[in-house]
Image (spheres, rainbow, N blue to C red):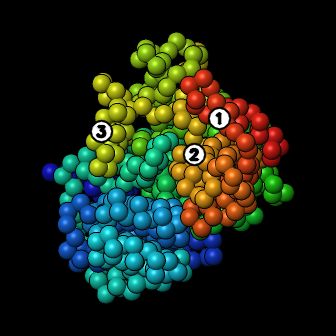
Amino acid sequence: MKNNNLFAALRAAFPSDLDAVAIETGDGLNYSWRDLDRSTAMIANLLVSLKLPAGSRVAVQVEKSVEAVMLYLATLRAGYVFLPLNTAYQSAEIEYFIGNAEPAVVVCSKKNFGWVSKIAFKAGTHNVFTLDDDRTGSLLERAAHCSDKHEMAFVKSADDMAAILYTSGTTGRSKGAMLSHGNLLSNALVLKDYWGWKPGDVLIHALPIFHVHGLFVALHGALINGSKMIWLSKFDPRLIVKKLPEATVFMGVPTLYVRLLAEPGLDKQACRNMRLFVAGSAPLLIETFNEWKDRTGHTILERYGMSETAMLTSNPYQGGERRGGTVGFALPGVSLRVQGDDGQTMPTGEIGGIQVKGPNVFKGYWRMPEKTKEEFTEDGYFKTGDVGKIDERGYITIVGRSKDLIISGGYNVYPAEIEGYINDMPGVAESALVGVPHPDFGEVGVAVVTSKPGAAVDPGQIVASLKSKLANFKIPKQCFVVDELPRNTMGKVQKNLLREQHKNLFA
């Protein structure tokens, strides 16, 4: 009987020479494929020794490191569910995730152990470990005593859960998208083929590893191809330009491409061995697309995906034009349609809601059966919440997001969440958060606030207060206090007018 564990497929793709370099770090450390195999076995054995119930969640909020990847792979290997958390999340957010997911194990940075462990123990988690990006922490200390041989957990069904990724609805609290071993493996295999991965490819990995782009698209891409990775714990444009001649594949969010273009050393010579630059997680400006082509001779390949679905569409790698401003075609096995509010498929070039179906599409939200039912159509399509159109050649363009989502530097910012915190502040009557264009981040949040009668509200104080509660990428870059918010006849705040009013703020 076939083992459907995603780790089985990744391990089978390791090259025959296990002593070859699998990961080279920015500061010159080399990890072999044998190191990956042995270390994941030791961490998996540690997890198994904890006698966790089947299906246990392992929640991880640590800085990017090769050891963090080993923990991810070990969690799969041992048959548990991996739950990555953004390193920028603060206490109110972590309290919600741990309370909602009820993980059996929490792993955090040493500097956060005090407050994270308090939240975890209160929520009923028995095991809290530390892991830092300098190869230290209680997780590694404990795993060092475990055997480096481990028989991989048997996963009976491809539908069994491998990971939970928290995404936010545009209203209310975050939702945990449950991704199966089958979802992730099918997507990795499709992209391996579609993007022409080949022997000898080397990936520069410069993305965070707590969301789809860095953890699944980039990492799985290299692993399923048995490819070496040049591993950068932080985005360093100068170092990337220096490393480009040693690599063939790079993946980044638009902000990273903008910052690379500011490096004088970026030219055709630096990119002479590169075969593929991929951009995603946010819209790529056409100026960036064109300037990249002029400077490097390479055309960036744009694609589109979500936490709930991994990758859905891609511009062609070969045999077709990569068109700036579009996200290409639906990937093999993915069915994509654009529908109007009446449930009718929109004609070519007409804008509507994007709906998708395929082996990569998740089964639902963690402990939210009603929400899950709401997000799927009668015939099994997932409503992405994105709005777009398909042109006469079949290219898909995303024109916006149905619920005012802001994408800042590749990270999703959900206005409703931030508005909730602002509205709770003393003296605040109401708030509206809108996204406005920004030269570096693509888009940033601007908060517009009204005060209660007789109350004096300080915009600077609002921003300062948010900084202690929320991740930095969610903090509005500007805050304005106004007499009233613009409304339509139904009393709904007209965010389009606020966006228009502040669109040149950072121009």
Find disc 2 in the rendering and name its residue: 415
Name which of mark 2 and mark 1 comes first in the sequence.
2
Image coordinates for residue 252, horizontal then vertical, percent: 62, 51
Q: Nearer the viewer, residue 277 or 395?
A: 395
| Circle nearer the viewer, 1 or 3 | 1
> Residue 413, can we see it?
no
> 395 above or below 62?
above
The residue depicted at 81 percent of the width and 40 percent of the height is 504
The residue depicted at 75 percent of the width and 64 percent of the height is 238
Does residue 334 appear to the left or right of 264 in the view shown?
Answer: left
The residue depicted at 32 percent of the width and 69 percent of the height is 123
Q: Nearer the viewer, residue 282 or 79?
A: 282
| Amino acid type at image mark 1 | Lys
| Amino acid type at image mark 2 | Pro
Label ID, residue 370: 3
Q: Are marks 2 and 1 in contact (CB under 8 Å)?
A: yes
Label ID, residue 495: 1
Name which of mark 2 and mark 3 comes first in the sequence.
3
Tag 2 secondary structure = helix
Q: CA distance from mark 1 to mark 3?
A: 28 Å
Image coordinates for residue 132, horizontal then vertical, percent: 50, 78
Tag 3 secondary structure = helix
> 177 above or below 116?
above
Q: CA distance from mark 2 to mark 3?
A: 22 Å
Image coordinates for residue 301, horizontal then vertical, percent: 62, 39
The residue depicted at 25 percent of the width and 46 percent of the height is 159
> 249 above or below 486?
below
Q: Nearer the viewer, residue 52 or 474?
A: 474
Q: Residues within 10 Å of mark 1 (few under 14, many from 20)?
A: some
